[in-house]
Image (tube, rainbow, N blue to C red):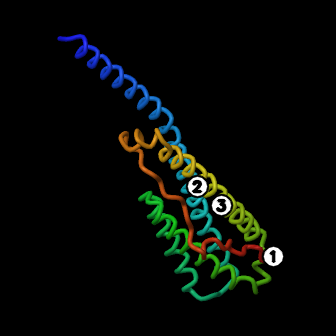
Amino acid sequence: MTDRTRNNIIAVAILLVILSIMATLIRWQLVPLRENVNLQQAQIESNLQRRSDLIPNLVATVKGYAEYEEDIFNSITEARSNLQLSLEEGNLDDISEANDNLTLALNNMLSVLEDNPELKASEHFRTLEVELTGTENRIAVSRYYYNEAVNEYNTAIQTPPTSFFAKFLGFEPVEYFEASKEANEVPNVDLS
C-alpha cells in the first residue's frame, strides 16, 4: 500500500468520523425539538378533552332549564363524540375538524340560550360558563405553543447543514395547527 493510498484511507476515515459526530450532535438537537412538538400536541388534545368533558354537564344544565329543539342537543352530542374519536386516533387534522364542528354546535346552543333569564341566573350554569371560557382560552394558548414548537422544529430541520442530516435521520416537517375561519370565532359564552 502506498503512502498516498494510506493517506486517502485515513482522510476518508476521518471524514466519516466527523460526519458521524455531526449526525449524532444534530440528532441530539432535533430529538428534543420533535418531542416538544409532541408535547404541545398532547396539550392541545388534553384541553380539547377537558372541553369535551364539560359539554355533558353544560347540556344537562341547559336541558334542565330550557325546552329547545332536540336537534341542537343532538348536534352537540354527535360533535362531542366525533371529537372523542378523533382524540383517540390522534390525527391532528381530524382533531381540528372535529373541534371546529363542536365549536359550531356550541355556538348554536349558546346563541339560542341568550333569551333565557332563568338559565343565566343559575349558579351551576355560571360555573360551567366560566369553566368553558377558561378552557377555550387554554385551547388557544395550547395552539399558540404548539405552533411555536412546530416553527422552531421546522426551522431547525430546514436550515443547513442540519437539513442534510435531518432528512437522512428521518426528521420530517410537521404541519401547523390551523383552525377553520369559523373556529377562530370564540363561542359567545357571556350570557349576561
Q: Nearer the viewer, mark 1 or mark 3?
A: 3
**Image quarter of residue 62:** bottom right
For the residue pair 64 and 137, the one nearer the viewer reads as 137
Residue at 48% x, 69% y: name it.
81
Left or right: residue 9 versus residue 28 is left
- In the rendered structure, find residue 147 and report the number of the disc placed on it: 2
| Picture disc at residue 140 | 3
Label 3 crowd (10 A; few <14 / some 14-19 / many >=20): some
Amino acid of disc 3: Ala
Against 97, residue 110 (above or below) is: below
Mark 3 secondary-structure assignment: helix
Q: Left or right: 123 with respect to 140? A: right
**Is tag 2's residue or tag 3's residue first in the polypeptide sequence?**
3
Residue at 73% of width from left, 68% of height from top? 129
Q: Amino acid at mark 1?
A: Ala
Tell me the mark number nearer the camera, choosing from 2 and 3: 2
Mark 2: which amino acid? Asn
Residue 170 located left or right of residue 185: left
> Of callouts 1 and 3, which one flags the residue occurring earlier in the amino acid sequence?
1
The answer to whether 4 is drawn above or below residue 168 in the figure is above
Position of the C terminus, as image quadrant, is bottom right
What is the x, y in percent for residue 96? 52, 66
Q: Nearer the viewer, residue 136 or 58?
A: 136
Say which quarter of the image contains residue 124: bottom right
For the residues bearing labels 2 and 3, Cβ distance under 8 angstroms = no
Q: Is residue 144 above or below residue 183?
A: above
What is the x, y in percent for residue 6? 25, 13
Residue 121 is labelled as: 1
Q: Nearer the viewer, residue 5 or 129?
A: 5
